[in-house]
Amino acid sequence: MTRNLNTEISNYALLIFLGAIWAASFVAIKFSNLIFNPIEVGFYRTFIGSIFLFLAVKLRGGSISLFSENTRIYSLIGFLNASVPFTLLPYGLITLPSNIGVIILSANPFLALVLAHFFTLDEKLSLRKVIGSIIGFSGVVFAVGVEIFVSDWDSLISAIAIYVGASSYVISNLIIRRISHLPSDMVTMNTLFWGSIWLLPLVLIYGNLGKIEFSYIPVFAIIYLGVIPTGLAFSLRQVLIRNAGSTFMMQVGYIIPIFGVFYGWLFLDEKIGYSLIISVLLVVMGIGISRIRAPIKE
């Protein structure tokens, strides 16, 4: 019994840790944006992450295969799961505060529920899931503010960019299910590698590496993005899924917006008003209602 309790405590500690480091990526993006453009942030994040995982796989004695019969699907997943979101998130955060960005991104479980209903056989929509999605998405609208839909076009475009990036994650996860039989570290390493390949021509054209003024904080932030929330977090995510299951892992959605709002206040001096607190509560409540397993009359 003591052993089971210790295992459960370890699982929750790892879950909280993952939520904390993923939430911190929004602050790191804001700092990276100080000298890097969104394409550069996306490229360096994917490239550094792929190098980290390459070394991790080699140290564990695993095999490396960047070109195989799965190259085409790796390339597609790399585009949707890395190139698109890792570029659109920095673009959106040029205008929006990090705490708003993290709440918008937290809406992707609700889109996942809708897409899973149409493209999977075992995850159908129910009244409970619809209600949870409506509540959670209302939290996003509450955070962003209704007024941006009619007056602040820059903020609206930024919010759309972040949401499209979040949607790209969701779509790619549906494709990843098709290769779930493959080693997870190999899938992610190839995803990041091909994600950086997609962005390489753009960074060669629009990058400013030889023109930027060096600054320690943005450079450290870009390294953090590649190593911690992209490389290390994936490895820890797989450990948690193996020990506690994917359903347990999904609970990280409760944690990210809470840490994200806190980090924005702590590191970026972003204000925490009543509307932001209500938004976080609505998002967390929506995720909770959507994932309750207890039978409910519908």
Image (spheres, rainbow, N blue to C red):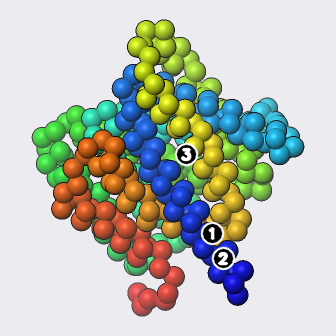
Residue 39 can be seen, yes or no: no
Q: Residue at x 62, y 26 (%)?
A: 197
Q: Secondary structure at mark 1?
A: helix
The reply to whether discs 2 and 1 touch (Cβ–Cβ < 8 Å) is yes
Q: Compute the Cα span from label 3 to label 1.
A: 19 Å
Residue assigned mark 1: 10
Image coords of residue 108 (percent x, y): 43, 56
23 left or right, relative to 58: left
Residue nearer the viewer, 192 or 8: 8
Q: Amino acid at mark 2?
A: Asn
Mark 2 or 3, nearer chain start: 2
Mark-to-mark CA distance, 2 and 1: 6 Å
Residue tagged 2: 6
Say which element carries label 3: helix
Is the Cβ of the residue at disc 2 closer than 8 Å to that at disc 3?
no
Packing grade of label 3 (10 A; few <14, some 14-19, many >=20) is: many
Earlier-in-chain disc, 3 versus 1: 1
Which one is in front in this view, the residue at disc 2 or the one at disc 3? 2
Task: Report x, y in % for residue 142.
Answer: 22, 58
The residue sitting at 14% across, 44% down in the picture is: 150
Q: Nearer the viewer, residue 186 or 167?
A: 186
The crowd level at tag 2 (other Cα within 10 Å; few <14, some 14-19, many 20+) is few
| Picture quadrant where residue 237 is located | bottom right
Residue that label 3 marks: 229
* Residue ID at (40%, 13%): 213
Q: Amino acid at mark 1?
A: Ser
CA–CA distance between discs 2 and 3?
25 Å
